[in-house]
Image (spheres, rainbow, N blue to C red):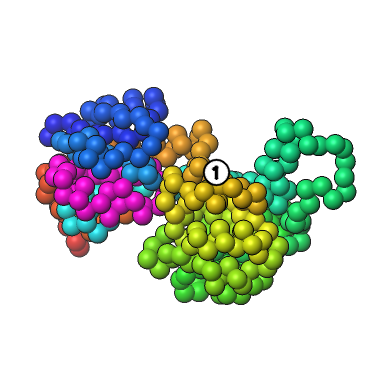
Amino acid sequence: MSKPSVLVLGNLLDEAAEILKVSASFLEHPRENAVAEAKLIELLDKKDAVISEPLDHFTENILDSCPDLKVIANRAVGFDNIDLEQASARGILVTNTPGVLDAATADLAMALMLAVTRRIVEADRYVREGKWQGFRSDLMLGPDLFGKTIGVIGMGRIGRAFAQRARAFGMKVIYCRFSARDAKDDQLKEHLEAERVDLKMLLKESDFISLHCPYSADTHHLIGATELSLMKPQAVLVNTARGRVIDETALVKHLEDRKIFGAGLDVFENEPTLPDKLKKLDNVVLTPHIGSACFDTRKRMTMLAVESIKAAFQGKQPKHLLNPEAWDKFKQKTACPNPNPNPNQNQSR
């Protein structure tokens, strides 16, 4: 078959471009904001694959309008921007980039927690505006971290990386997961002295709470008004997962009423649009979805996306394939070559 045609949404690193151009032709579409649906459909015309990012939404309508599309390589761990069921029904493979951004995202969660508790953004502004008149014992006070309890919601790779950092700060770790107890809980107990609790207890007992769970129908508004009301008055909430895990309206109300100490947010319900009330609060630190924004991390994410496309069109299942059920339909659409020329090699014995 001829070289597949690939749309790259955002910038492609030179090293990744060198690898991709060997096996595919590609169009790079740099942008600062999400591409409008009509424009995205236009860009995807006659494209076999796309390298996407979290702000690119692949709805049923877009998938219907792009009959040539066969692979979506999402440069992210989360994939709530893609209708996975509809992609599978059309034989479109969807891949992500897990395992390479754990440390970077955990680092940002720690940075947000520190920025809120030590009031770093507020203090920086205070100095720049010429308000500082000298040392005061009551200036910019905030909660201590050492000896306090951190509640981690979601204990996947990023959650564990964050918990390790919190332990290094002398914090006690409690956590909740949304799966049955297994050997992983024993490992967390052994290596991090972490205690598994239910969500209600975590909210009540934690001095700090950090969200690291994926977004799904089950986690939509996982933290709402009821959950926020269970938190301690001096608690700090951090979210580097997905914005829709928190009821943003309820959170703004709690922050306005000073019912919790503050929040550090890297993700939002309707990115990149934020409520004006949220932007005016001085007890929240806001960052523009930069959890993985480190040089080496973004490079590894891009390379994974490129390798996924390369593997797929060589007739090999990509390592990080999210919908293996689409593989047979994909092969029919592409008439991929058999990577194992020996017809007896894969026969069952």
Task: Determine the residue positioned at 27% across, 55% down.
Answer: 83
Q: Is residue 198 above or below residue 59?
A: below
Q: Is residue 5 above or below residue 93?
A: above
> Residue 279 location in percent, x, y?
56, 47
Task: Determine the residue positioned at 62% across, 58% down.
Answer: 256
> Residue 82 location in percent, x, y?
30, 52
> Residue 152 location in percent, x, y?
58, 62
What's the magenta region? 57-83
Residue 1 in which image quadrant: top left
Residue 187 in which image quadrant: bottom right
Left or right: 38 in relation to 158: left
Left or right: 102 in relation to 218: right
Q: Amino acid at mark 1?
A: Thr
| Residue at numbered disc 1 | 287
Is residue 306 within the magenta segment? no
Residue 313 in which image quadrant: top left
Judging depth in this view, the residue of 137 and 212 nearest the camera is 137
Q: Looking at the magenta stretch, what is its main secondary structure?
A: loop
Q: Is residue 237 above or below residue 93?
A: below
Check disc 1: other Cα within 10 Å, few if <14, some if 14-19, many if 20+. Answer: some
Instruction: Determine if residue 345 is in view.
Output: no
Left or right: 112 in relation to 247: right
SS category of the residue bearing label 1? loop
Is residue 59 within the magenta segment? yes
Quarter holding the C terminus is bottom left
